[in-house]
Image (cartoon, rainbow, N blue to C red):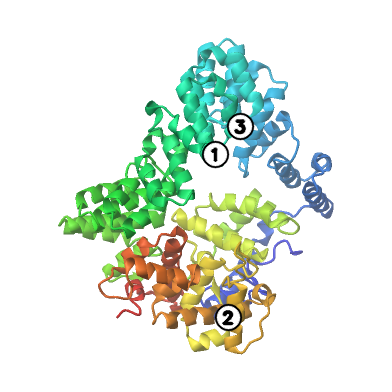
C-alpha cells in the first residue's frame, strides 16, 4: 500500500480471493468508475500523509513495541513532529498492558485520546497506578470521581482511601465495603482495605467476598479470609473448595459438614451439581442443578449457572420430563445479554410447545422482546410472540407481531415471519454509491488515517483494535462499506466482514460489505450442486471469507474443510490432495468444500437442514438427533422446533445463520427482490 489514496477496494482483494464482486460484473464496473471519478474530485481535500521520516518513526515504534522495547517507543513518541504519528504511538503505549507506564503517562493519554479505542482499559490501568502517583489525596478524589467514577475494584479502594484521608469517612467506608463485597482486588488493594477499614467490615462482608472469590475460582483469595469467617460460612467455603479441586478423599465428609442453614446456598449447589456431573452421574447432578435459585447468586455468576443448567435441559427433554426442563430454565435471574435471551426464550418455548401454557409463554416472550435490541433477537422474540398470541386466539395481535418481525428480513426468524406473509427479500441489490461528502468525511477521520498507516506495517491485532472500535460507532452504511473495504485492502477479510456484521447488530446494513460476493470455481457454477447461494452462505458462516483461516479443530480455508475430508473428497473428484492448497488456493478449497456439501445433501435425500447440521457437527451427530427428536424430513415433525431441540448451541446457531445467509445470497445473485424460500428450504427432502 504505497499509494496513500489508492481507490478504496478497487481490486477488492485480487489475489488469494480472486475477485470479490459487489452484485455482478456490471454493478462492479459502475462502482469502480464512480469511485475513480469520486476520488479525482475529492483528492484535493484528503488529509496529508506523514512525511517519510515520520512514517519511519511510526514503523520503528511499532517494531519496538512488538519487541517490548518500551523505552524506544517513548523516545520515538516524544520526538514525533506529526500529531497523528505521536498519537498512534501514545495509544500503542497506553493501551498495552505490557508497557510499564506511570499514572501521569496514562492520564495524559486519556486526555489526548478522547475518541480512541481502549479507553476503558487505560482508565483501569490508571486506577491501578494512582496509588503510586504524586497526586494529593484531594486531587485523587477529583480524578477518580470524573468520567463516571471508578471502573475497577482497585479504583474504588483508591477513592475510598482518598476520601478517608480527606475526612469523608462515611462515604469512604461505604465504598470500601462495596469494593470488598463486589470486586476482585489485587494484593495491595486488599491490604489497604484490611489496614484502614477492617473495623467497618462485618462477618457478612467477609462471607460475601469469599463467595465471590469462589464463584471466580479464586480459591487462594478465599483461603486467606477463612479465619475471618463465622464457623458455618467456613465449613461452606471449605466444602466448595473441595468440590472445585476434586481431591481423591474427603469430598463427602466436607459436603456432609455443611450446616443445614447453608445447604441451599447457590454456590454450594452449583459446585455440587458440577462435581457430580463431571463424576459421570448426570441424573443425580440435575437434582442439585434444579435446586439452584440463580436470583440468590451474584449477578455475574448467573450466566455460569444457566450454562450448567443448560446441560441438563436436553437430557430432561429426551426423557420427556418437560416440567424439569422448564424448572431448569425459569427463574434464571438474568436481565440482559446472550444467556438472558437464550434462557427467557427457552422458558417461553417450553411453556408454549410442551406444557400447553400459552399465557406464561406470552409473558416470557414479551419480557424477552422488551430487553433485547439486536435484529436476530428481536425477530426471534416477535416471531414467538406471534406464535403465543395465535395459541391464545389473538390472531390480530399475532399478525401484527409477524409484520414487525418481517422487517428484519435478513435474519432467520424475520425471514420465517416474512415468508408466512408471502414476503420477498427487499434488501437493496447493492449499497448506494458512496457520495463524495461521505468519502471525504470518512477519510478525514483520525482513526481511519491511523488505520491506513497501521495497515502498512502493523499486525492484524493492531488493525482490528481500531477497526472494531470504529465499526461499533459508525452509523452510516456507506462509511461501514468504506471501513470494510479498507480492511479488505489490507487482506483482512475476517475484519472486513465483521465490521459490517457489527453494523447489522445495530440495524445499520451495509449490504455489499456484510454479504460479500465471490466468484465460484467454474466446476461449482456449472454443476449447481449445491446451489451457489448455499456455498456462499456456508463460506460466510465458516470463515467470513478469510482464505487463510485455520480453526482450533484444524478446519482450513474458505469452507473450513478438515484434511481427512479434503483427502477423501479430492480422491473422489480425481484431484490430487494438497494440504497447503486448502489455505493458499481458494478455488481448490471451494471445489472440495462444495463437492462435500453436495455429497451431504445427496446423502440426506436433499435435506438442507441435515446437510448443514452435518457440515458443522458431522453426520454422526445428525443421526443422533434424528434418534432423539425424530427425522426433520417427516411431515409430522416441526422443523423449526427440531432445530431448536439440537443440544449444541453452536450448531443451532449455525443452521439458522446459514439459512438466513442463503436467502440473502439468492437475492444478491438474482440482482432483484426475490421470494423468501426459507420454509421450502426447511422442508427439502421431506417424505
Residue 662 vertical position relative to residue 179 in the rendered view, above or below? below
Residue positioned 49% across, 33% down in the render: 254
* N-term-proximal mark, 1 vs 3: 3
Residue identified by numbered label 2: 592
Q: Nearer the viewer, residue 348 or 285?
A: 285
Residue 191 vertical position relative to residue 624 in the rendered view, above or below? above
Residue positioned 41% across, 35% down in the render: 266
Residue identified by numbered label 1: 249
Number of the label disc, if any, that sits on residue 10 = none
* N-term-proximal mark, 2 vs 3: 3
Residue positioned 59% across, 21% down in the render: 159
Q: In this figure, what is the number of numbered marks?
A: 3
> Measured from the top left, where is residue 421 in percent x and y?
26, 68
> Measured from the top left, where is residue 501 in percent x and y?
51, 59
Task: Check disc 3 and report its element: helix, strand or loop.
Answer: helix
Task: Check disc 1 and report its element: helix, strand or loop.
Answer: loop
User: In the image, 250: left or right of 458?
Assistant: left
Dot 2 crowding, Cα within 10 Å, few <14, some 14–19, many 20+: many
> Measured from the top left, where is residue 574 in percent x and y?
61, 90
Residue 520 vertical position relative to residue 463 in the rendered view, above or below? below
Residue identified by numbered label 3: 220
> Measured from the top left, where is residue 620 in percent x and y?
46, 71
* Most distant residue in the left direction: 393
Amino acid at each position: 500500500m504505497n499509494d496513500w489514496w489508492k481507490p478504496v477496494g478497487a481490486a477488492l482483494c485480487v489475489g488469494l480471493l480472486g475477485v470479490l464482486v459487489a452484485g455482478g460484473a456490471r454493478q462492479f464496473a459502475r462502482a469502480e468508475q464512480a469511485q475513480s471519478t469520486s476520488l479525482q474530485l475529492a483528492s484535493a481535500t484528503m488529509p496529508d500523509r506523514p512525511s517519510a521520516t515520520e512514517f519511519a518513526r511510526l514503523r520503528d515504534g511499532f517494531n519496538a513495541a512488538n519487541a517490548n522495547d518500551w523505552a524506544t517507543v517513548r523516545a520515538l513518541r516524544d520526538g514525533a513532529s506529526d500529531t497523528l504519528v505521536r498519537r498512534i504511538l501514545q495509544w500503542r503505549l497506553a493501551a498495552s498492558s505490557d508497557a510499564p507506564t506511570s499514572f501521569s503517562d496514562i492520564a495524559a493519554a486519556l486526555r489526548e485520546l478522547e475518541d480512541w479505542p481502549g479507553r476503558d482499559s487505560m482508565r483501569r490501568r490508571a486506577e491501578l497506578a494512582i496509588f503510586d502517583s504524586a497526586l494529593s489525596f484531594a486531587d485523587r478524589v477529583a480524578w477518580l470521581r470524573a468520567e463516571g467514577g471508578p471502573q475497577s475494584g482497585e479504583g474504588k479502594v483508591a477513592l475510598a482511601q482518598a476520601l478517608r484521608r480527606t475526612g469523608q469517612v462515611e462515604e469512604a467506608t461505604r465504598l470500601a465495603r462495596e469494593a470488598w463485597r463486589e470486586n476482585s482486588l489485587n494484593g495491595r488493594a486488599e491490604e489497604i482495605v484490611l489496614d484502614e477499614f477492617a473495623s467497618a467490615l462485618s462477618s457478612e462482608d467477609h462471607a460475601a467476598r469469599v463467595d465471590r472469590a469462589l464463584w471466580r475460582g479464586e480459591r487462594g483469595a478465599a483461603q486467606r479470609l477463612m479465619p475471618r469467617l463465622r464457623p458455618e460460612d467456613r465449613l461452606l467455603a471449605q466444602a466448595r473448595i473441595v468440590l472445585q479441586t476434586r481431591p481423591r478423599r474427603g469430598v463427602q465428609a466436607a459436603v456432609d459438614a455443611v450446616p443445614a442453614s447453608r445447604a441451599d446456598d447457590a454456590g454450594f449447589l452449583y459446585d455440587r451439581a458440577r462435581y457430580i456431573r463431571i463424576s459421570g452421574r448426570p441424573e443425580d447432578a440435575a437434582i442439585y442443578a434444579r435446586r439452584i435459585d440463580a436470583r440468590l447468586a451474584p449477578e455475574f455468576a448467573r450466566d455460569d449457572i444457566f450454562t450448567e443448567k443448560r446441560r441438563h435441559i436436553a437430557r430432561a427433554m429426551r426423557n420427556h420430563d418437560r416440567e424439569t426442563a422448564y424448572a431448569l430454565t425459569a427463574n434464571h435471574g438474568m436481565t440482559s445479554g446472550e444467556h438472558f435471551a437464550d434462557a427467557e426464550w427457552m422458558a417461553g418455548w417450553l411453556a408454549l410447545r410442551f406444557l400447553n401454557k400459552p399465557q406464561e409463554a406470552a409473558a416470557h416472550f414479551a419480557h424477552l422482546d422488551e430487553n433485547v435490541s439486536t435484529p436476530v433477537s428481536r425477530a426471534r422474540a416477535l416471531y414467538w410472540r406471534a406464535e403465543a398470541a395465535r395459541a391464545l386466539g389473538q390472531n390480530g395481535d399475532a399478525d401484527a407481531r409477524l409484520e414487525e418481525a418481517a422487517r428484519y428480513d435478513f435474519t432467520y426468524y424475520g425471514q420465517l415471519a416474512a415468508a408466512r406473509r408471502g414476503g420477498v427479500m427487499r434488501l437493496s441489490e447493492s449499497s448506494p454509491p458512496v457520495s463524495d461528502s461521505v468519502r471525504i468525511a470518512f477519510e478525514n477521520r483520525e482513526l481511519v488515517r491511523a488505520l491506513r498507516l497501521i495497515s502498512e506495517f502493523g499486525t492484524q491485532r493492531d488493525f482490528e483494535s481500531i477497526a472494531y472500535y470504529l465499526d461499533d460507532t459508525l452509523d452510516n452504511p456507506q462509511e461501514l462499506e468504506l471501513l470494510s473495504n479498507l480492511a479488505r485492502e489490507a487482506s483482512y477479510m475476517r475484519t472486513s466482514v465483521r465490521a459490517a456484521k457489527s453494523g447489522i447488530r445495530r440495524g445499520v446494513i451495509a449490504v455489499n460489505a456484510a454479504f460479500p460476493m465471490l466468484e465460484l470455481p467454474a466446476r461449482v457454477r456449472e454443476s449447481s450442486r449445491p446451489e451457489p447461494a448455499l456455498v456462499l452462505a456456508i463460506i460466510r458462516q465458516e470463515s467470513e471469507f478469510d482464505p487463510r483461516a485455520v480453526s482450533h479443530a484444524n478446519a482450513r480455508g474458505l469452507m473450513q474443510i478438515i484434511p481427512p475430508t479434503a483427502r477423501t473428497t479430492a480422491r473422489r473428484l480425481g484431484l490430487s490432495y494438497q494440504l497447503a492448497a486448502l489455505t493458499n488456493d481458494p478455488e481448490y478449497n471451494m471445489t472440495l468444500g462444495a463437492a462435500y456439501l453436495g455429497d451431504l445433501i445427496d446423502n440426506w435425500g436433499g435435506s438442507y437442514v441435515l446437510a448443514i447440521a452435518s457440515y458443522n457437527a458431522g453426520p454422526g451427530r445428525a443421526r443422533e438427533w434424528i434418534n432423539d427428536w425424530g427425522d426433520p424430513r417427516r411431515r409430522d415433525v416441526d422443523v423449526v422446533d427440531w432445530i431448536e431441540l439440537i443440544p449444541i448451541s453452536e450448531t443451532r446457531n449455525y443452521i439458522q445463520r446459514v439459512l438466513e445467509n442463503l436467502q440473502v445470497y439468492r437475492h444478491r445473485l438474482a440482482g432483484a427482490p426475490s421470494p423468501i424460500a426459507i420454509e421450502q428450504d426447511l422442508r427439502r427432502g421431506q417424505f
